[in-house]
């Protein structure tokens, strides 16, 4: 598997804005990537350049035609980067808005009385959309339970819950609370084996920054990401839909192209920054593999990112150098378990007798940015079944370093302490 070496990591880190310094806080380690990854410097530059352009698309002038070319290129780049089997890409207000739109149209285009299937692992963007639009479309919404011990959901669970009249199914690629990935290709195959015409919508928002996206392998009808969680910027989401979903009735201007899902004038800068993300990943894939084929470079980048993040989470959980890991700290409980192959760059934890809010505050005071998750409408589906009110989410990306993990562990030792036998050995 392609690896990110120490010299390459320094080059990678230099491509991101505020990689080790917060403009408000000063020096800090950024372990809050699940809340939004760091932004490529090229994205910042492209955003500023595009924001200054006065032209709109669809005009008979060179400036307008240039904008249209930028958008076409971005869509072409996404098709290669995500290995899209036809269909179309389009931008929307946010990842959440796009998931609502895809699920709405899939439900309304499907038979009344059918089943809309999801899981309790999913973000409220899919759960809420499915509940609302299944009700409006006269369908029954069913949520199959995820595995609380592993923090994920298996294809076998879908196989047990899918019925021949399942008309829409949703899958989360990676949980933003547990950090565990889902085998979406296997889940989709289990669904199609029983309900081959079902519309399958995948929430790829959390997964996008942490490994390869291969739409051709998923056999789905929709896939949504939030680019600010994939090295771009806030203010928009990106959806891919299959040719089949493209053709269902949907909001559009009368007299306009029948397969157009974009509403109004596009922000060219949002598309242009997707090309920046693609260029970065293509560069990274070439740097770790030497491959010349574009898709091969994207694949190599995804593999290298996954390997780097596994090294980071392994160090955090099992220790690095002479520092004990979280698994060695008796007061720490790791959600999803210490040894979980589904983990993607994220460790969610609690500390006995120390409130999660205090853990986050003390880490922040030490220059380490993490996040408090509460049993609310965002995370209650994960935390409440575990009997937890809160947890600490520590989320990493491939540009983080083992040195940053070591500093985190040293602070966590002060907060939680190692196991007693380790303390005795040290003495």
Image (spheres, rainbow, N blue to C red):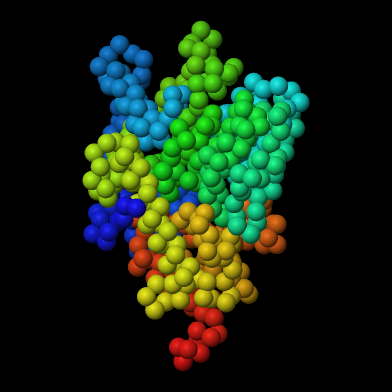
- The location of residue 72, given as percent across then percent down, is 34, 24
Q: Say which residue appears at 59% left-offset and 68% top-offset.
A: 333
How many badges with numbers are in the image?
0
Please say whether residue 148 is visible from this viewpoint: yes
Farthest-out residue, front:
193
- Residue 213 lies, with reference to residue 335, above or below; the image says above
Taking depth in this image into account, of 35 and 399 the one nearest to the observer is: 399
Please say whether residue 357 is visible from this viewpoint: no
Q: Say which residue appears at 45% left-offset and 32% top-offset.
A: 216
Q: Say which residue appears at 37% left-offset and 75% top-offset.
A: 321
Q: Say which residue appears at 27% left-offset and 48% top-offset.
A: 289
Instruction: Tell me if 204 is positioned left or right of 27 in this view.
Output: right
- Residue 274 lies, with reference to residue 333, above or below; the image says above
Taking depth in this image into account, of 29 and 48 the one nearest to the observer is: 29
- The location of residue 21, given as percent across then percent down, is 34, 59
- Residue 417 lies, with reference to residue 155, above or below; the image says below
Taking depth in this image into account, of 203 and 152 the one nearest to the observer is: 152
Farthest-out residue, top:
255
Instruction: Tell me if 352 is positioned left or right of 238 in this view.
Output: right
Would you identify the image quadrant in which residue 63 lies? top left
Would you identify the image quadrant in which residue 190 lies? top right
- The location of residue 121, given as percent across then percent down, is 63, 48
- The location of residue 57, given as percent across then percent down, is 36, 19
Taking depth in this image into account, of 129 and 181 the one nearest to the observer is: 181
Would you identify the image quadrant in which residue 267 lies? top left
């Amino acid at each position: 598997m392609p690896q990110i070496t120490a010299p390459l990591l320094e080059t990678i880190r230099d491509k991101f804005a505020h990689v080790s310094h917060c403009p408000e806080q000063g020096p800090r380690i950024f372990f809050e990537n699940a809340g939004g990854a760091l932004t490529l410097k090229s994205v910042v530059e492209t955003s500023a350049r595009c924001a200054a352009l006065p032209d709109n698309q669809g005009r008979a002038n060179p400036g307008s035609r240039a904008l249209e070319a930028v958008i076409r290129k971005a869509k072409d780049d996404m098709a290669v980067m995500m290995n899209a089997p036809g269909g179309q890409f389009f931008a929307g207000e946010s990842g959440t808005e796009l998931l609502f739109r895809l699920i709405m149209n899939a439900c309304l285009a499907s038979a009344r009385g059918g089943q809309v299937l999801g899981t309790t692992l999913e973000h409220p963007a899919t759960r809420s959309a499915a509940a609302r639009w299944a009700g409006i479309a006269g369908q029954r919404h069913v949520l199959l339970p995820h595995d609380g011990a592993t923090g994920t959901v298996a294809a076998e669970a879908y196989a047990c819950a899918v019925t021949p009249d399942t008309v829409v199914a949703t899958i989360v690629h990676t949980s933003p609370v547990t950090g565990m990935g889902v085998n979406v290709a296997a889940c989709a195959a289990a669904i199609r084996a029983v309900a081959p015409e079902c519309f399958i919508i995948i929430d790829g928002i959390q997964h996008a920054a942490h490994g390869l996206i291969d739409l051709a392998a998923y056999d789905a009808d929709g896939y949504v990401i939030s680019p600010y969680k994939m090295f771009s910027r806030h203010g928009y989401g990106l959806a891919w839909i299959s040719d089949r979903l493209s053709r269902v009735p949907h909001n559009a201007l009368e007299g306009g192209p029948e397969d157009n899902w974009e509403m109004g004038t596009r922000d060219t800068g949002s598309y242009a920054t997707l090309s920046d993300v693609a260029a970065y990943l293509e560069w990274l894939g070439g740097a770790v593999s030497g491959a010349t084929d574009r898709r091969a470079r994207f694949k190599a980048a995804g593999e290298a990112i996954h390997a780097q993040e596994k090294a980071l989470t392994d160090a955090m959980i099992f220790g690095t150098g002479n520092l004990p890991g979280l698994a060695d700290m008796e007061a720490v409980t790791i959600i999803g378990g210490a040894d979980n192959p589904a983990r993607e760059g994220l460790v969610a934890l609690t500390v006995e007798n120390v409130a999660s809010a205090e853990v986050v505050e003390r880490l922040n005071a030490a220059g380490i940015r993490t996040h408090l998750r509460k049993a609310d409408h965002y995370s209650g589906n994960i935390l409440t079944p575990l009997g937890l009110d809160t947890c600490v989410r520590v989320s990493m990306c491939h540009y983080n370093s083992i040195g940053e993990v070591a500093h985190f562990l040293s602070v966590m030792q002060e907060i939680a302490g190692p196991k007693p036998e380790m303390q005795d050995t040290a003495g």
